Structures are given as structure tokens and as C-alpha cells.
Image: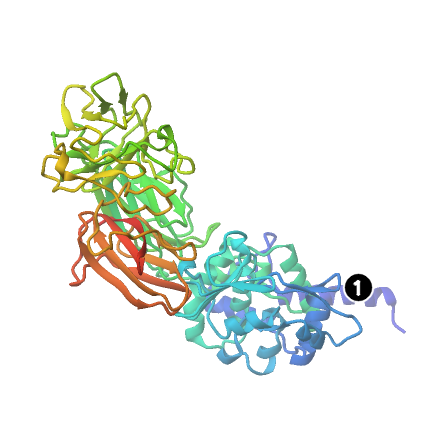
């Protein structure tokens, strides 16, 4: 028998050599630090692809009994659903009888239907049977919440957006056949896909990978491997030639293998638009690219920009690229405020993918907006009083009094500093601690109480003090901040010539150019507003809407109307819920009560329906920026929501 010490030394040297052969890793944990692209990919295949794996039946048993079992329990990676496994029963059979089976992160129909590809544990995970079936062979990606058909969590599913724990749901969207795992599994799923496509590219569907690649890189970046994922990697290795998933070991591999070319074309954000909101604010809006990448924005006043450098992270407020950085964001809009009035601001937006030195930027898209002067020096008749609630019945007068104004001019007007007074001693100066903008052709509600829970359900835009509306007769005078320039006035008499409301508002029924201080132009409201407490009126929107019946009332509680985004450009999503079989119409009106278009008219076929409006009228022509009214009607009932279109 040889020298045991010499044999031990030989084994140590041999083990070290094998380790070095399998993974040339530097002190920072970077695998093959000098390699990129195809050369790196070939090296990973050569040293990390297992020659021997378990057959599929054994692989499932090991996954349930050892790889993913903790305290005799196994958890579905898509829903958090957990089952107890009886140690004395076949693990796969026991799991299946408890609604759990095996998910191929890379679907069988896309190349994982036989051989090592079918049973490689690095892409197999325990999932609920129903969720596995729901995903099918759909690609992984970000689903628009408003378009998601099924939300999966624990042992149940929803068909509408959850009110809580939204990050713990996986989502299935049927129209585009897309599946989005819950947040804590996105990075794990991404690394499983990159592993599979790298090791089994000879059988993997190339188009299927290309469809997901950019989105998965984003998930890999924002959800790095945690302790549990590394532990799972360690548990699998002994069953697969001691080969681990290298994409879990080294976070730089995805970038270095699949994004090694610095000129990698990351798609720009779509419909990037800068819109002036008031004299010191521009609103930026955009849609993410198809990969759902974050966006970084730069601004300046010159209109000339430098390109961002791949691999460099830029911080919010940093002077760079001949401008100032508006930091990286996952949102789709941004308010750029505290600007200089009368100045043109230029913006460039870049999609950005990757983090921590792996940033890749798109070529960029540009827009600009001028901070126009918002007039406070309106002319008489530019803003008119259109509706008054002086005698509410659902709540006390001190809680429920309000009046409505309308901007009849062609410009946005700042009413901050304006004065409200009567002929007695009531007087209030509007102090909004900044601009108080009423847009052209828009309504605004001013009231004594802005709490909709106690004011009768009114959305009050501004709460005033020291001003009351008399029931028997009173006056409302609107003055500029100088206290001398009268913009509009109403002097009602409490019933002699004017209406005498009790639980309803009185509204101006004439043309906006007519004298609104003429009693015959005022009528009593006969329609309750949505979410109100029973009083009649239309605070904040047109007082009469064509084609709506006079005795319409709010829709039943089981019917809901939701609009997102709002404000929007160029398209908004309308989601409504209603019992199947109801006859519904969904129409768009301008604030003069004229119908713009009809989006739906017929029997409701689904409990939840999603439609989109692209800002066009019934002739297919783009309508102008402004405030519109979306009206969902069923029989004698309707609900309405204001929407704002920004061009």
C-alpha cells in the first residue's frame, strides 16, 4: 500500500485542478474574467453543462424530497402555496395529489421535451397544477396589470387587480399569451432560462428566447440571487456531475455572454412627450419599450446632448451629458417643476437595461416644452360661475356648500390670489401656496369643505373660508387679486325669479357667452352625481350631457369604471366591471355635452371588460387636448369619469 500522506496530497492537488478547470474564477467571483460573447458562452458549456443528469421521474422525486423541501414542506414558486409531503409516500405522487407538479421554466414544447434538457434540475421548479397549466408554454414577461386576466396566489386566483399583496401574485395575460411570475421569483426564473438556453441551445427555440431576453435581463438585474437560491444551486450539483448554474454564481455572465457588444440596441421608450402644465411645470410622459426597461432622462435649455456611456450609472440631479440628469425611473411620467417661466426646456429619454456597471442605453428620443406664461390677468367673462349648491339636504350647509366655475377662455388661468366676496361682509382670498390653475374649457369646484366623506361626496378642488352661501338670496363676486377687476358675478334672489333649491344645485343652462347673471338661464339639477350622498347636481363636469335621460342615477355598486393612465397621451385604458348580460353603452363627451365617440353599445359578455381610447372621435380624427367625460350607462343608470387628454 502506498504512502497515505502522499495519496492525500495527490487527491488535494487533483481536486484543486478540477476546480480550476471547471471555473476560472477571480477573487471577485467573476467566472472567466477575460472572456466575453461566444468565447465565454462556449467555455460555460464546456465546463458547466452536465453530462449525466437524473431521469425525469427521479429528478421530480429528488426535487420534491430534497432540493425544494424545507421542514417536510414544498412551496409553489409562482404562488407561495405550500404543501406537507408525507416522507413514507412517493414524493411526486404525494405532491400531485395535493395539487403540485413540476414546472419546466423552459417549456417542453420549446425544446425541453426529452433527454437531459427535460430533467435538468436547474430549470425545474415545484408549482401548483392549475398555475402550471395556466402558464402553459407562454413566454415570461411583464404583464400590464390592467390587461391581466388571472392573478394567482396561494390556493386561489382573482380576475381583477388585487387590493393587497400584489407582489405575491403571478399574472397570466391571455390576449398576448404572457406569464409574469411573482416578484420574488423573477430573478430565479430569468437565471434558469439563461442557463437552459446556454447549455441546450442546440434544441432550444431561438425565437422564444429572443422574445424574453431583454425582460429577463432586467429581472436578473433587479432581483439578484439570494441565499436560498444559492443553497438550491448547491443541492442540485451533486445530482448533476457537481455542475452548478453559473448564472447564479456570477451576476456579470448574462451581460458578458448576451450583451457583450457595446452597440447592443436597447429599444427607445415610445411616445415620449413633454407638455407644459403651467408657468413653472412641464409634464413628461412616455411608454416603456417592449422589454419594459427603465428610463433615464436628461434636460437642458440648449437642445444639444451627449450620449450616455454604457456601463456608467448616472444619478438624479447629476450635471452630465451637457445637461442635468433626471434619474433612472420605472415610472411612465414625471413632473419637472420649479422652472423659469417663458423658457424652452429640452429633454432626451433613454431606455436603460442592467445595473452595477452593466448599464446599456438606447440611442434616445427627444421632446421639448415651453413654460408659457399662465395669465392671472384674466378678462371679465373668461371665468364664469356655472353651478351653485347653496342649500344641500344630505349634509349641513356648513359642510356641503359649493359652487362651480368654468374657464371660458382659450388659455390656462391662474386663480391663485383671486378674491371671492358678496355685498355683505363675506370675503376670501384664494391662497393655494402656489399656482391654482384652471385649464381652458375645464371646470373647478370651490367649497366650504374639501372632505368628500363629510361634504356629500363632492370632489372639491379648493376649500375656502369666511364665505357662506345664503339660502334665501346672496351674491358671488369673483375679483382678480387687485380687488377691483370683476371677472364674474351672480346675484340670486332665493325663489322670486331664480330657482329655490333644496337638496339640489342650480346650474347655468345658457351658452357660455350669454349673461350668466340672468335668472331665466338657471335651472334646478335633477341628477345625482357619482359617489354622492343623494343630493342632485354635477360638480366638476358639464351640467347637461346630450343623450342622457333626465332621471338618470348612479350605477349600482357592482358596476365600476376605472381609467388609467389619466391624464394620458396618446392612449388610455378603460376597465369596467358589470354583471354579464347587462346592456351597456360607453361614450365619450366633451365638456359642452357633445358626444365625441361611442366605444361600446351592446350586451356585456364578461364580468370585466377592458377597452382603449386613442383620443379620436367617431370619424377617426384626433381630438384636441382637454377635459372629456367618459360615461358608462346601463338603462336609466350611468356613471361618469373625467379624463384629461394631453397632446
Looking at the rendering, which quadrant does residue 416 occupy?
top left
Could you tell me which residue is drawn at 31 percent across and 51 percent down?
A: 640
Q: Residue 347: x percent and y percent? A: 27, 45
Which x, y percent locates residue 447? 31, 31
Q: Position of residue 274 (x, y in %)?
A: 25, 46
Q: Quadrant of residue 430?
A: top left
The residue that appears at 21% across and 25% down in the rendered structure is 475
Please, which residue is most extreme toward the front here?
496
Q: Nearer the viewer, residue 536 or 24?
A: 536
Q: Residue furthest top?
A: 425
Mark 1 = which residue?
9
Q: In which quarter of the image is the N terminus?
A: bottom right
- Circle 1: is it few (<14), some (14-19), or many (20+) Cα within 10 Å? few
Name the spot of residue 462 as percent of width and height, x first: 32, 32
Q: Is mark 1 on a helix, strand or loop?
A: helix
**Residue 78 appears in the picture as rendered:** no
User: How many numbered badges does the structure rendering display?
Assistant: 1
Is residue 157 in sight in this rendering? yes
Residue in the picture at 19% in, 56% down: 595
Amino acid at each position: 500500500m502506498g504512502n497515505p500522506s502522499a495519496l492525500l496530497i495527490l487527491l488535494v492537488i487533483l481536486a484543486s485542478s478540477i476546480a480550476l478547470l471547471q471555473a476560472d474564477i477571480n477573487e471577485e467571483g467573476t467566472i472567466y474574467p477575460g472572456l466575453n460573447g461566444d468565447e465565454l458562452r462556449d467555455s460555460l458549456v464546456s465546463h458547466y453543462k452536465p453530462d449525466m443528469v437524473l431521469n425525469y421521474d427521479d429528478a421530480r422525486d429528488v426535487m420534491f424530497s430534497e432540493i425544494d423541501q424545507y421542514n417536510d414542506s414544498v412551496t409553489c414558486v409562482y404562488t407561495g402555496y405550500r404543501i406537507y409531503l408525507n416522507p413514507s409516500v412517493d414524493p411526486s405522487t404525494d405532491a400531485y395529489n395535493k395539487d403540485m407538479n413540476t414546472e419546466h421554466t423552459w417549456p417542453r414544447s420549446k425544446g425541453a421535451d426529452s433527454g437531459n434538457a427535460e430533467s435538468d434540475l436547474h430549470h425545474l421548479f415545484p408549482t401548483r397544477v392549475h398555475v402550471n397549466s395556466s402558464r402553459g408554454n407562454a413566454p415570461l414577461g411583464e404583464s400590464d396589470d390592467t390587461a391581466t386576466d388571472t392573478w394567482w396566489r396561494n390556493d386561489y386566483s382573482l380576475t381583477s387587480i388585487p387590493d393587497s399583496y400584489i407582489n405575491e401574485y403571478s399574472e397570466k395575460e391571455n390576449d398576448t399569451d404572457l406569464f409574469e411570475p411573482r416578484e420574488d421569483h423573477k430573478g430565479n426564473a430569468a437565471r434558469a432560462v439563461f442557463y437552459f438556453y446556454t447549455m441546450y441551445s442546440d434544441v432550444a427555440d431561438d425565437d422564444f428566447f429572443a422574445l424574453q431576453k431583454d425582460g429577463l435581463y432586467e429581472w436578473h438585474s433587479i432581483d439578484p440571487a439570494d441565499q436560498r437560491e444559492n443553497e438550491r444551486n448547491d443541492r442540485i450539483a451533486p445530482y448533476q456531475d457537481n455542475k452548478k448554474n453559473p448564472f447564479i454564481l456570477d451576476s456579470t455572465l448574462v451581460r458578458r455572454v448576451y450583451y457583450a457588444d457595446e452597440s447592443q440596441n436597447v429599444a427607445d421608450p415610445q411616445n415620449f412627450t413633454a407638455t407644459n402644465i403651467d408657468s413653472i411645470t412641464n409634464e413628461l410622459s412616455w411608454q416603456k419599450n417592449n422589454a419594459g426597461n427603465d428610463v433615464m432622462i436628461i434636460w437642458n435649455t440648449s437642445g444639444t446632448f451627449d450620449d450616455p456611456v454604457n456601463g456608467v450609472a448616472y444619478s438624479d440631479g447629476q450635471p452630465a451629458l451637457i445637461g442635468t440628469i433626471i434619474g433612472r425611473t420605472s415610472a411612465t411620467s414625471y413632473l419637472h417643476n420649479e422652472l423659469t417661466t417663458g423658457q424652452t426646456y429640452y429633454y432626451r429619454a433613454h431606455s436603460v437595461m442592467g445595473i452595477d456597471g452593466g448599464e446599456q442605453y438606447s440611442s434616445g428620443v427627444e421632446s421639448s416644452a415651453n413654460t408659457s406664461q399662465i395669465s392671472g390677468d384674466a378678462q371679465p367673462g373668461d371665468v364664469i360661475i356655472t353651478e351653485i349648491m347653496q342649500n344641500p339636504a344630505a349634509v349641513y350647509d356648513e359642510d356641503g356648500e359649493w359652487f362651480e366655475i368654468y374657464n371660458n377662455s382659450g388659455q390656462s388661468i391662474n386663480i391663485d390670489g383671486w378674491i371671492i366676496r358678496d355685498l355683505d361682509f363675506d370675503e376670501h382670498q384664494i391662497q393655494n401656496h402656489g399656482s391654482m390653475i384652471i385649464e381652458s374649457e375645464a371646470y373647478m369646484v370651490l367649497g366650504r369643505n374639501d372632505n368628500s366623506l363629510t361634504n356629500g361626496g363632492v370632489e372639491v378642488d379648493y376649500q375656502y373660508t369666511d364665505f357662506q352661501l345664503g339660502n334665501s338670496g346672496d351674491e358671488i363676486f369673483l375679483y382678480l387679486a387687485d380687488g377691483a377687476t370683476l371677472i364674474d358675478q351672480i346675484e340670486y334672489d332665493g325663489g322670486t325669479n331664480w330657482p329655490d333649491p333644496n337638496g339640489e344645485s342650480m346650474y347655468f343652462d345658457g351658452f357660455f357667452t350669454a349673461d350668466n347673471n340672468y335668472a331665466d338661464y338657471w335651472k334646478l339639477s335633477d341628477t345625482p352625481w357619482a359617489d354622492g350622498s343623494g343630493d342632485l347636481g354635477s360638480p366638476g363636469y358639464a351640467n347637461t350631457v346630450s343623450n342622457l335621460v333626465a332621471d338618470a342615477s348612479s350605477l349600482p355598486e357592482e358596476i365600476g369604471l376605472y381609467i388609467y393612465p389619466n391624464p394620458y397621451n396618446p392612449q388610455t385604458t378603460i376597465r369596467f366591471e358589470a354583471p354579464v348580460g347587462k346592456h351597456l353603452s360607453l361614450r365619450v363627451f366633451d365638456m359642452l355635452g357633445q358626444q365625441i365617440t361611442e366605444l361600446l353599445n351592446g350586451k356585456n359578455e364578461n364580468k370585466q371588460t377592458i377597452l382603449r381610447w386613442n383620443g379620436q372621435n367617431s370619424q377617426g380624427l384626433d381630438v384636441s387636448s382637454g377635459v372629456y367625460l367618459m360615461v358608462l350607462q346601463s338603462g336609466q343608470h350611468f356613471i361618469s369619469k373625467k379624463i384629461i387628454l394631453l397632446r
